[in-house]
Image (spheres, helix red, strand yellow):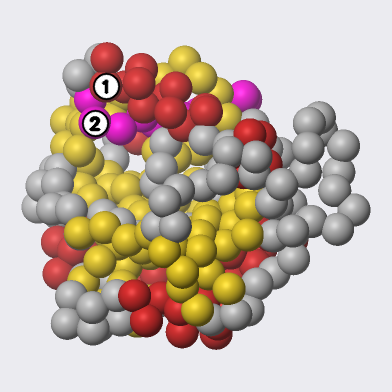
Amino acid sequence: MWALTDGVARPIDGLPVEDRGFLLGDGVFETFRIAHGRIRHSALHAKSLASGCEALELPVPDWAAIERAIAGVTDADDERIGKLILTRGPGGRGLAPIIEPYVRLFFEHFPVPPRPAAVRLATVALRRSASSLAARFKTLSYADNLAARREAMARGCNVALLLTESGLVSGADSANLFWERDGQVYTPATACGIRNGVMRQCVLGWLEAAGRVTQEVEAGPDALMTAQSVWITNSVGGVMPVSGIDGQVFELASGILVRLQAADL
């Protein structure tokens, strides 16, 4: 792990325990692919981090300095997964806001994991609040997603599918959701407690360029049961086909899904 300051990365042993990011989850993070020392979809990730900072009333860091620091500690010939963590810094006990936060930036990177051939989803009991900051931004408070993933795995699935408190389809525990029915592609609208992820934006852009208009909808889970193909997206796994939800089986060789995977967004 590295601490980032003014475009320079300094190695550290771990996150300071007095930091509010550790104590209270008071911060945001961003996960991305790094290829040849450069962040893929860098501008989208910069915008994503900035929106999370603004939502939590944190200073927005200098993205160009972040890029310089990361380039200095990653192999230009390697592909990695990077994780950037921004915290409010130390602040003592309690929930009272810090008048002048000492914002800290941390970075770590990992080998790129193999992409799964397909994933299985289970609809979990935990519901997602459409107004929750933790649902709409990459905050360090991940308790809900962890609980959802535990339930899904206990039921023999890889990933949790979450509904909103009103019963609408929201998305996966750590990914956005798409489905195709009769050639039309759908995805939950932002009103469904989703984060408008970088890979979601890339998929929407690719579909538009291919002449496919995606419908962003507020739909119940029954809409998924009539889909021909379903997939989830995030910056680590890219486009990941869904083989089944709650026992319902979906096609893995759908033309548009195969083309999306081949595009390597």
Q: Position of residue 205 (x, y in %)?
A: 41, 74
Q: Where the C terminus falls, by quadrant? A: bottom left
Q: Which residue is mark 2?
A: 158
Circle 1/circle 2 CB separation < 8 Å: yes
Nearest to the observer: residue 244 or residue 136: 136
Is 70 magenta? The answer is: no
Element marked by disc 1: helix
Dot 1 surroundings within 10 Å: few (below 14), some, or many (20 or more)? some
Please tell me how many numbered marks the rendered image carries: 2
Residue 153 numbered mark, or none: 1
Residue drawn at x 59%, y 57% is 86
Label 2 CA crowd tier, 10 Å (few <14, some 14–19, many 20+): some
Residue 80 visible in the shown view: yes
> Above or below — where is 154 with respect to 178?
above
The magenta-colored residue range is: 157-169
> In the rendered structure, which amino acid carries the disc numbered 2?
Asn
**Nearer to the camera, 204 or 54:** 54
From the top left corner, tell me how far across and down residue 117 is, in percent.
Answer: 10, 47
Q: Nearer the viewer, residue 157 or 29?
A: 29
Residue 26 image point, x, y percent: 67, 43
Residue 208: x percent and y percent?
Answer: 40, 74
From mark 1 to mark 2, how far is it between C-alphas? 6 Å
Judge left or right: residue 205 versus residue 136.
left
Return the mark for residue 126: none
Q: Residue at x 46, y 32 (%)?
A: 145
Residue at image point 63% right, 34% down: 23
Q: Amino acid at mark 1?
A: Met
Say which element carries label 2.
loop
Image quarter for residue 110? bottom left
State the residue at coordinates (52%, 28%).
Answer: 143
Left or right, 181 with respect to 144, comes to: left
The answer to whether one can see residue 134 in this image is: no
